[in-house]
Image (cartoon, helix red, strand yellow):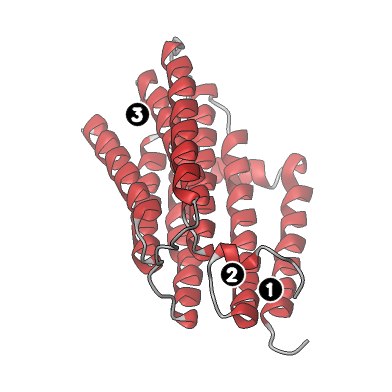
Amino acid sequence: MDAFLFYAAAALAVLSALVVIGQRNPIYSAFALIVTLCSLSVIFGLLGSPFIAALQVIVYAGAIMVLFLFVLMLLNVKREEDAPGRGGRALAGIATALVTLLVAQAGAVLMRAEPGPAPAFDASTRRMAEILFSPHFLYVFEATSILILAALVGSVALAKKDL
Amino acid sequence: MDHPTFVQHAVLLSLVLFGLGTLGVFLRRNVITVLMSIELMLNGANLAFVAFSRAAGTLDGQVLVFFVMVVAAAEAAVGLAIVIALHRHKDTLDVDAFGVMKG
């Protein structure tokens, strides 16, 4: 059952990722990306990380994608049109070939590795909180709040009409 | 999920997602789709973190995923604000229109 869920979610993630980069209408891309993020959340859950799985749905599929859709609808984005005479098609072919080659190489190396037995693992929210608020990560955690504040001020300053 | 090959396949999936995101950055001409492809790459990296954290039996990778998500949220907010400002300037979202930084 776990295996079926895992491979179904993996196939769904790859298919919807293909739709994200293959689709000319960015609204459809955004919805396909939501499907990718949700199926990744399933995989996180199956890998024994319920906290990250919940965050994936709440923060990524919820907050970030709503931001994307909001901007898409605010700007009234049209379908991407073919730009004639841009000469980008050869470049696109080369990029596709290079990335495919790199992924195939890395995948071949990865599949040669002999996986050892997985150790015992407790990634409950309680354990996550204990680590996140331990002295080791506490200052990093506080620093991210400053980062969020800076991003907030920065995005208001950038998107404001007359500055 | 205890079988070690699932960890291996999860890392393979993260590799594929990262590659697809890279391709999206290269192939798409809409700035917002390029930003979404970057999110795809970040998710590939996140999946690798979670898979290796499972294989190692420690939680440090998961804490890193948490911080990657925070940074991704900040990046999306600032990036989309920049997109709105660019759209106001040039009235287009084509990346080729933004070749020159001079406003």
Quadrant containing the N terminus of chain A in the rendered view: top left
At x 43% / y 24%, what residue is drawn? A104
Circle 3 SS class: loop
Q: Which residue is mark 3?
A: B1
Q: Chain of mark 3?
A: B
Q: Chain of mark 2?
A: B
**Mark 2 or 3, closer to the camera:** 2
Q: Which residue is mark 1?
A: A155
Disc sitting over residue B80 in the figure: 2
Circle 1 SS class: helix
Crowding around mark 2 (Cα neighbors within 10 Å: few <14, some 14 to 19, many 20+) is many
The x and y percentages for residue A18 are 34, 47
- Mark 2 vs mark 1, CA separation in Å: 8 Å
- When the figure is inspected, residue B77 is found, relative to residue A85, above or below; the finding is below
Crowding around mark 3 (Cα neighbors within 10 Å: few <14, some 14 to 19, many 20+) is some
Q: Between A24 and B74, which is closer to the camera in this rendering?
A: A24
Same subunit, labels 3 and 1: the answer reads no
Asked if labels 1 and 2 touch by Cβ distance under 8 angstroms, the answer is: yes
